[in-house]
């Protein structure tokens, strides 16, 4: 049984570190070592005391504060396992996380395949869990295609399981980065390599007020630098493998980043690349065939951010929607993007309507629509997958 090293970098982790360590120790895959690296915590010894209380069940190291990249790299230098897994001190693995990922790698027949998976967000203050299923937005083939996942931010660093040889091949995490060290490393490590995606949700990622501002808005220079580097490094052939054409790759990346307004430089770069794009005739026919094969009346269920993005996406393909539908009574009668928001009763027993679910939590809405005798139902993920390789008729930037 091959050994897996679980590295837990921590800084002032008194509130959550014990949960993280316990989840690592509870793995059904038994050949694991747990390495905790204290990155110069300033909490009066609380973090150190928690880690030391586990005795020889874990390996514990302390260092001066230098950022998460330095802590992870120290763990990599000290690890004795063949495989590496990163567990943030405020996240938790499910008990079968490592076992299922090791089995997936073994089943792939590629010992050095890089494995990642679905996960859940736990919003601490609201005590709410939200499942993140990347297959609602992308295909398994896309998620396993080279460095597609880090480019489109469809991977979480704590879902990773990777063979140690990749560090020898591409180097460790960059220690000068504060917010993008995981995406930047994964781009280098996954580029040109086989990945394995496990559909199960195997990690819980906490969202809480103590995390600090590790966001795009606070580190926009890093994000601009990273995405510009991606675009300038990738070959045209790689872009075509991700999105059908170089132009469509730029368009898809723009859609993914445009709500992150502080990432201004990369958005300007992509906007320039999209000027004067011409859609091929065969793609025009695909759009027309889609229109003919679906009901003319289209409604989007969900008048939030995702629903608004879906409406703009459809508009860019010349597809107009009739109405937004939402369960929130406060939204009824209001307009989003100039389109009226109605209650679900608007589509009750309506036979000739296509309802597209524009929300993250799909299953409850599907059940609701089926009870309302709505026949034609699809999701934002299915729409995005269908149109993924097709350039829009117009680009609303």
Image: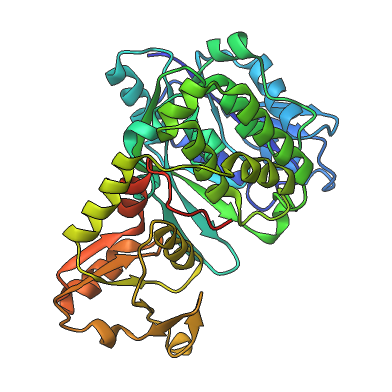
Image quarter of residue 21: top right
Residue 160 spot, x, y in % from top left? 50, 31
Q: Please give the name of the residue rendered at 70% of the width and 46% of the height, measured from the top-left corner.
A: 13
Q: Please give the name of the residue rendered at 66% of the width and 46% of the height, measured from the top-left corner.
A: 267
Residue 276 spot, x, y in % from top left? 55, 44
Image quarter of residue 38: top right
In-front residue for pair 295/70: 295
Q: Please say whether residue 394 is visible from this viewpoint.
A: yes
Quarter of the image containing the N terminus?
top left
Q: Please say whether residue 19 is visible from this viewpoint.
A: no
Relative to 285, is 156 on the left or the right?
A: right
The correct choice, above or below, for 258 with respect to 82 in the image is: below
Residue 5 spot, x, y in % from top left? 54, 22
The correct choice, above or below, for 352 with respect to 28 in the image is: below
Q: Please give the name of the residue rendered at 55% of the width and 69% of the height, measured from the top-left corner.
A: 126
Q: How is the image coloured?
A: rainbow
In-front residue for pair 104/155: 155
In-front residue for pair 386/135: 386
Q: Please give the name of the residue rendered at 53% of the width and 50% of the height, measured from the top-left corner.
A: 255
Quarter of the image containing the C terminus?
bottom right
Q: How many marks?
A: 0
Relative to 28, is 305 on the left or the right?
A: right
Relative to 167, is 381 on the left or the right?
A: left
Relative to 311, is 12 on the left or the right?
A: right
In-front residue for pair 218/130: 218
Residue 237 spot, x, y in % from top left? 46, 21
């Amino acid at each position: 049984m091959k050994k897996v090293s679980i590295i837990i970098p921590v800084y002032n982790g008194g509130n959550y570190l014990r949960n993280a360590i316990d989840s690592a120790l509870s793995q059904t895959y038994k050949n694991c070592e747990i390495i905790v690296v204290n990155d110069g915590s300033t909490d009066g010894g609380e973090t150190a005391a928690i880690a030391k209380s586990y005795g020889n069940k874990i390996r514990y190291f302390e260092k001066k504060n230098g950022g998460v990249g330095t802590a992870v790299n120290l763990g990599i230098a000290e690890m004795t396992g063949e495989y590496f897994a990163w567990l943030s001190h405020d996240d938790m693995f499910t008990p079968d996380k490592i076992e299922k990922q090791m089995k997936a790698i073994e089943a792939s027949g590629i010992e050095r395949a890089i494995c990642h998976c679905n996960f859940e967000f736990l919003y601490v203050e609201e005590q709410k869990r939200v499942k993140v299923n990347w297959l609602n937005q992308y295909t398994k083939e896309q998620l396993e295609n080279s460095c597609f996942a880090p480019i489109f931010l469809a991977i979480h660093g704590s879902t990773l399981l990777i063979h140690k040889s990749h560090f020898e091949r591409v180097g460790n995490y960059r220690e000068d980065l504060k917010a993008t060290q995981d995406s930047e490393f994964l781009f280098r490590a996954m580029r040109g390599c086989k990945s394995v995606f496990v559909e199960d949700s195997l990690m819980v990622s906490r969202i809480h007020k103590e995390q600090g501002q590790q966001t795009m808005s606070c580190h926009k220079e890093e994000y601009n630098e990273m995405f510009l580097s991606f675009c300038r490094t990738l070959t045209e052939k790689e872009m075509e493998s991700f999105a059908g054409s170089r132009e469509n790759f730029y368009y898809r990346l723009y859609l993914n980043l445009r709500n992150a307004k502080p990432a201004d430089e990369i958005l300007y770069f992509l906007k320039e690349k999209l000027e004067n794009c011409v859609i091929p005739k065969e793609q025009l026919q695909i759009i027309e065939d889609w229109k003919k094969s679906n009901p003319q009346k289209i409604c989007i269920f969900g008048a939030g951010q995702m629903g608004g993005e879906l409406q703009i996406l459809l508009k860019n393909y010349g597809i107009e929607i009739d109405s937004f539908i939402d369960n929130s009574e406060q939204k009824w009668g209001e307009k989003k993007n100039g389109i009226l928001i109605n209650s679900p009763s608007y589509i009750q027993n309506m036979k000739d309507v296509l309802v597209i679910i524009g929300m993250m939590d799909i299953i409850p809405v599907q059940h609701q629509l089926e009870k309302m005798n709505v026949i034609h139902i699809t999701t934002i993920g299915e729409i995005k997958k269908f149109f993924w390789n097709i350039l829009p008729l117009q680009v609303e930037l």
